[in-house]
Image (tube, helix red, strand yellow):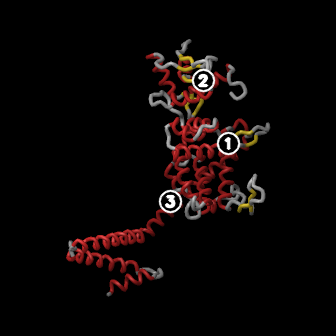
């Protein structure tokens, strides 16, 4: 496709992709089969578009369906002689994104189509208008996700015996739309105040994607509290797959002479190295024909071990989160009660100003409050924990 896109072999391959399932290109897409059946029964309803030079601009999937049905002709509209590639881009987007189109962009194809418009120099405003999306957050999220996936693919590359490089593919991330979009949201929120925790989050969730963890498991991988990798995963890694801990003391920024910044924090560096190990292992297990049996077996063992370690660490993290929530529940409830009393003060002031203050009702509820505070003080002073100023005040107040 890159070297000779108009050749018969390239066009046959393109037709195979058009017929294929976005999640598994070697399998026929049910949506394509449904389109073919519709055309078989009702014929071609919408014409395609073609340039005067014979390039089919819109209608390629219909053309593949017609060919698959043994049809010799396709109805098309011919663009005028003064057509340009800019016209083609605009038409392709406008027609593909119409609500009545037969086949939506897949997740990855949407990201690539948007990226193509950026490459062609289109403004953000024009791109968002063409794709019917909002600049924030959809546009920025889409750009971040594609860059993240492309970087992961590059990091997954493994050299083969013949000197070639094999890596993961874009289609390997086709089913991960929800996970990737949620990662972008959590990463950008955390990065503002905790860049190291955000970096750990990004790498640990990348590993989670590679190991096919479910949504609930992924959400227990957080960057808060020192980071999931540092707090839960790193202490459980055996020496055989533990990443190197060496971290550069400083990093020079390319293109900015004399500008030195601190090196990446150790936990984030280790998390990235561990993710790289899993990325490369996944590449080897997914392409066994390019590697020896020993290499495939070793990679499979690493992926299996990583899966066990991740799931065990997630269970511990989940238990810790529940424990923390239970421990903080009393303080949270008192905090809510404090807020309610603040609102009561404001309401009392407003009632006095209008002369509508009901002292008897307030007195009755204050007695109920005192009874509950006495219970709180009784339970809170039990145990061997240190009695702070707040609890001392409460004990004194209910004894008065």
User: Is residue 124 shown above or below 223?
Assistant: above
Residue 318: give its label: 3
Residue 283: which numbered mark, if any? 1
How far apart are the two marked residues, 2 and 1, measured between alpha carbons?
26 Å
Is 357 positioned to the left or the right of 95 in the image? left
Mark 2 or mark 3: which comes first in sequence? 2
Q: Quick one: which residue is furthest to the bottom in this view? A: 400
Q: Secondary structure at mark 2?
A: helix
Residue at horizontal 45 percent and vertical 20 percent from the top: 38
**Residue 386's x, y, as percent?**
48, 81
Tell me the CA gap for discs 1 and 3: 30 Å
Residue at left offset 66%, top offset 45%: 151
Left or right position of 76 against 248? left
Q: Earlier in the sequence, mark 1 or mark 3?
A: 1
Residue 80 picture quarter: top right
Measure the alpha-carbon separation of dots 2 and 3. Answer: 47 Å
The answer to whether residue 171 is seen in the rendering is no
Q: Label 3: how many residues lie within 10 Å, few (<14), some (14-19) or many (20+)?
A: some
59 up-or-down from 287: above or below: above
Which residue is disc 2 drawn over?
15
Task: Identify the residue at the far right of this view.
Answer: 162
């Amino acid at each position: 496709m890159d070297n000779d896109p108009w050749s018969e072999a390239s066009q046959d391959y393109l037709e195979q992709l058009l017929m294929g399932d976005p999640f598994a290109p070697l399998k026929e897409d049910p949506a394509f089969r449904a389109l073919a059946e519709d055309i078989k029964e009702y014929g071609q309803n919408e014409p395609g578009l073609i340039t005067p030079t014979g390039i089919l601009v819109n209608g390629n999937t219909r053309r593949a369906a017609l060919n698959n049905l043994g049809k010799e002709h396709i109805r098309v509209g011919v663009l005028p002689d003064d057509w340009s590639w800019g016209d083609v881009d605009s038409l392709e987007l406008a027609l593909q994104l119409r609500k009545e189109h037969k086949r939506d962009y897949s997740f990855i194809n949407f990201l690539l189509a948007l990226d193509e418009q950026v490459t062609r120099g289109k403004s953000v405003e024009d791109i968002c208008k063409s794709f019917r999306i909002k600049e924030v957050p959809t546009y920025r999220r889409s750009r971040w996700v594609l860059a993240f996936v492309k970087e992961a693919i590059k990091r997954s590359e493994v050299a083969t015996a013949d000197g070639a490089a094999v890596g993961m593919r874009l289609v390997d991330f086709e089913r991960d739309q929800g996970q990737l979009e949620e990662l972008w949201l959590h990463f950008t929120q955390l990065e503002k105040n905790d860049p190291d925790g955000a970096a750990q989050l990004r790498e640990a969730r990348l590993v989670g994607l590679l190991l096919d963890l479910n949504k609930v498991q992924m959400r227990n991988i957080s960057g808060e509290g020192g980071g999931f990798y540092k707090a839960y995963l790193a202490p459980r890694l055996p020496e055989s797959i533990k990443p190197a801990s060496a971290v550069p003391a400083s990093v020079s920024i390319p293109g900015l002479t004399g500008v030195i910044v601190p090196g990446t924090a150790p936990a984030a560096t280790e998390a990235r190295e561990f993710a790289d190990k899993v990325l490369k292992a996944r590449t080897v297990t997914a392409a066994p024909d390019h590697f020896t049996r020993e290499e495939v077996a070793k990679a499979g063992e690493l992926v299996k071990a990583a899966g066990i370690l991740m799931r065990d660490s997630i269970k511990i993290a989940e238990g810790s989160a529940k424990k923390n929530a239970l421990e903080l529940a009393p303080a949270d409830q008192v905090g809510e009660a404090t807020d309610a009393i603040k609102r009561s003060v404001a309401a009392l002031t407003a009632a006095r100003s209008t002369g509508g203050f009901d002292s008897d009702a307030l007195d009755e509820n204050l007695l109920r409050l005192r009874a509950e505070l006495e219970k709180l003080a009784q339970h809170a002073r039990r145990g061997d924990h240190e009695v702070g100023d707040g609890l001392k005040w409460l004990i004194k107040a209910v004894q008065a």
